Amino acid sequence: MTAHDQMRAMLDQLMGTGRNGENNKFQVKYSDPKVCKSFLLACCPHEILSSTRMDLGECPQIHDLALRADYENAQKKKDHFYDIDANEHLKNFIADCDRRTEQAKQRLAETQEELSAEVAAKANSVHVLAEEIGKKLAKAEQLGEEGFVEESMKLMGEIDELRKKKNDAEQEYRNSMPASSYQQQKLRVCEVCSAYLGIHDNDRRLADHFGGKLHLGFIKIREKLAELESTMEKRRKERREIQDRERGGSRYRSRSRSRSRGRDRSRERRDRDGRRDRSRDRRDRDRDRERRDRDRRRSRDRRRASRSRSRSRDKRRSKRSRSSSRNRRSRSHRSGSNDRKK
């Protein structure tokens, strides 16, 4: 990773996805199911054990420092209970590791020469002292690097005492079995990270193991799991109570919406009925008006027809009257004409 990439990652971790108005490269929110909830709580095994002998590869879910920053800001305002999801993830992972540890122990029991109970107890004593020396040596080196010189020197004094005890335990173990058997490497499985440790491993080898990223990573995961397990019953109860309240509120809102919809439907029904009644009244009035207009037109037409017939009769009468008048005058004229001739 370049210096530019490292600086960008630091800004993402501090400011989240919204810095400079940018969106995150995955185009999702921290609450998306595709985002690793263990990563948001900084305890995903895929991240912790990367670049170790047990590197798990890339996590199938999304890891993004900006999303972690968004989650940490949102968690201050609302509890998301992602620790419950992380607890299930870590519990399944550790259970799988413990199964592999037991299988490794079984393979060693089948392949290594079986020791008597007394010899096995002495070998175990050597292993315990060697592990204790390795842990304290790794711790002393860490304190020295951090500048705590006095604490580091104190641990080195304790390591010297443990080395003396280990030498005595090794001598007892050597004397309890044949030399040919003693030269064989007796292995045991580390209970924390399931790595193999040998009874003849020197202090440097043990310090490298107990101070290594693999062993410390497993310690971090197991400690985080123990921390989550201590509050898990309480946290699950709190989540159930909140979910019940939200469901109750949702049911109340649903009933309120249902009642509101019922009122709205009743109002719409009344409005529809009112509109239908008004429309029916309007149609009735229109029909009455059309009927009256039709009756008036018919009455007007009848009167016109009656007047027209009356005028026709009057014309005919007038015509007949004029015709009879002309006939009378004509007859009168002819009779007068005849009288003069005589």
Image: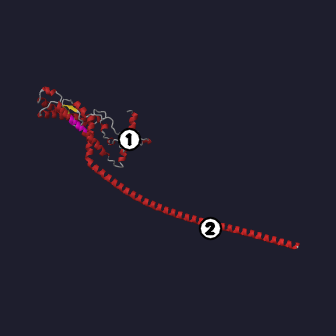
The label nearer to you, 1 versus 2, is 2
In this view, which residue lies farthest toward the front? 342
Question: What is the quadrant of residue 47 in the picture?
Answer: top left
The residue closer to the viewer here, 11 or 31, is 31
Q: How many marks?
A: 2
Of the numbered discs in the image, which one, if any, rests on residue 191? none
The residue closer to the viewer here, 154 or 175, is 175
Question: What is the quadrant of residue 71 in the picture?
Answer: top left
- Give the magenta range: 96-103
Residue 310 place in picture, x, y as percent:
69, 69
Residue 316 place in picture, x, y as percent:
72, 68
Residue placed under numbered mark 1 in the picture: 66
Residue at image point 60% right, 66% down:
295
Residue at image point 25% right, 38% down:
96
Left or right: residue 22 versus residue 173 is right
For marks 1 and 2 on the same chain, the one whose residue lies earlier in the sequence: 1
Residue placed under numbered mark 2 in the picture: 299
Question: What is the quadrant of residue 301 in the picture?
Answer: bottom right
